[in-house]
Image (cartoon, grey):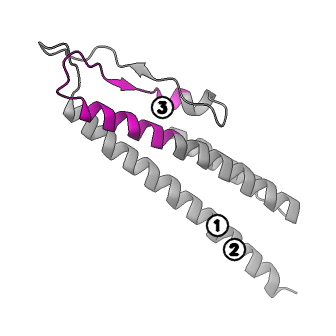
Amino acid sequence: MKDLLQVSGTHALWPFSCSGLSYMLDAVSQQLERYMDLVAERQKLVAANIANADTPGYRTRDIDFQFEFESVAAGEKPSVVEVKNLPVKNDGNDVSIDRESRLLSENDLRFRLAAAFLKGNFAQIKSAIEGAGDKS
């Protein structure tokens, strides 16, 4: 997942000082927080789409995940848009349960990867700190 790899790009900032450690933790944490907030926002939209699958005239809403992750400043809500080019039923509703189910699975995977990445970073930091203590 390209967007998650951008988060891991901050791994190159491996610190050799306490202030560097703080900087790296802040950078990684901020990126992961933003990423997970975006996943949570998309999850809400998918849930709303599923809840309105039988609502006449309801149009599927989503966010452009990649664009929003790259461009939205921390703390801002992502832009919600109607999804284009979906088949519209006779009642004007265009929600596809198959599409929304796929997005639920995708969001789950994104969240699990981000959580695993964060856990791995903390384990590396802990290992480095414990290893540095052994040399004293």
Q: Tag 3, which secondary structure?
A: helix
Q: Is residue 86 left or right of residue 38?
A: left
Dot 2 crowding, Cα within 10 Å, few <14, some 14–19, many 20+: few
Q: Position of residue 128 (x, y in %)?
A: 73, 73
Q: Which residues are magenta?
A: 38-67
Task: Report which residue position mark 1 lands on.
Answer: 122
Q: Looking at the rendering, which quadrant does residue 134 occupy?
A: bottom right
Which residue corresponds to mark 3?
Answer: 65
Name the residue rendered at 36%, 24% in the picture. 61
Contact check, label 1 and label 2, Cβ < 8 Å = yes
The three-letter amino acid code for the residue at tag 1 is: Phe
Residue reaching furthest left? 90
Cα–Cα span, label 3 and label 1: 26 Å
Q: Identity of the amino acid at label 2?
A: Lys
Image quadrant where one finds the C terminus = bottom right
Q: Which mark is residue 126?
A: 2
**Which element is circle 2 on?**
helix
Q: Residues within 10 Å of mark 1 (few under 14, many from 20)?
A: few
Tags 2 and 3 in contact by the CB under 8 Å rule? no
